[in-house]
Amino acid sequence: MNAWWSASVCINRTLGGQQSEPLCSRVYRQPPSLWRSAFMVLMDRLFFEKAHCQNIHLRWRDRRGA
């Protein structure tokens, strides 16, 4: 787990309780909306990665064995 992943988990815990899911994964699972789309575009640009939130969600899901 790198520093970005750890920070994302901390932010998610602050916003949503004791879940250890990264924030990008949590946002990816939400129903389509303007704020969700804006967040996902921003993360793609911030991390220079196409489909960043989806990739994080898939990594988190695989990591927890779901």
Image: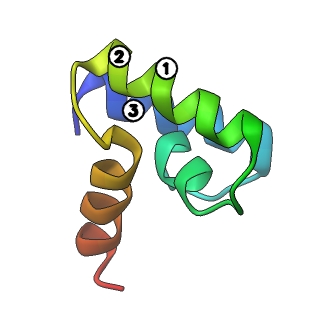
User: Which of the two residues, 35 or 26, is positioned nearer the viewer here?
Assistant: 35
Vertical side of 40 occupied by 3: above or below: above
Identified by mark 3, the residue type is Ser
Is 53 located above or below residue 20 in the figure?
A: above
Image coords of residue 49 (percent x, y)? 22, 29
Q: Which residue is mark 2?
A: 45
Residue 63 tag number: none
Residue 28 percent across, percent down from the top left: 53, 54
Q: Quadrant of residue 12?
A: top right
Looking at the picture, does residue 15 appear above or below residue 17?
above
In the shown orientation, is residue 5 left or right of residue 50?
A: right
Per the model, the C-alpha gap separating discs 1 and 2 is 5 Å
Which is more toward the observer, 35 or 7? 35
Does 62 appear above or below 34?
A: below
| Whether label 1 touches label 2, CB < 8 Å | yes
Query: In the image, what residue type sits under mark 1?
Result: Leu
Q: Nearer the viewer, mark 2 or mark 3?
A: 2
Mark sitting earlier along the chain (1/3): 3
Q: Residue at x 55, y 41 (%)?
A: 23
The three-letter code of the residue at mark 2 reads Arg
Q: Residues within 10 Å of mark 2 (few under 14, many from 20)?
A: few
Query: Helix, strand, or loop for circle 2?
Result: helix
Q: Is residue 20 or residue 53 the one in the foreground?
A: 53
Per the image, the residue denoted by label 3 is 6
Q: Which residue is mark 1?
A: 42
Residue 35: image quadrant is top right
> In the rendered image, which quarter contains the N terminus?
top left
Question: Which numbered disc flags the more N-terminal residue, 2 or 3?
Answer: 3
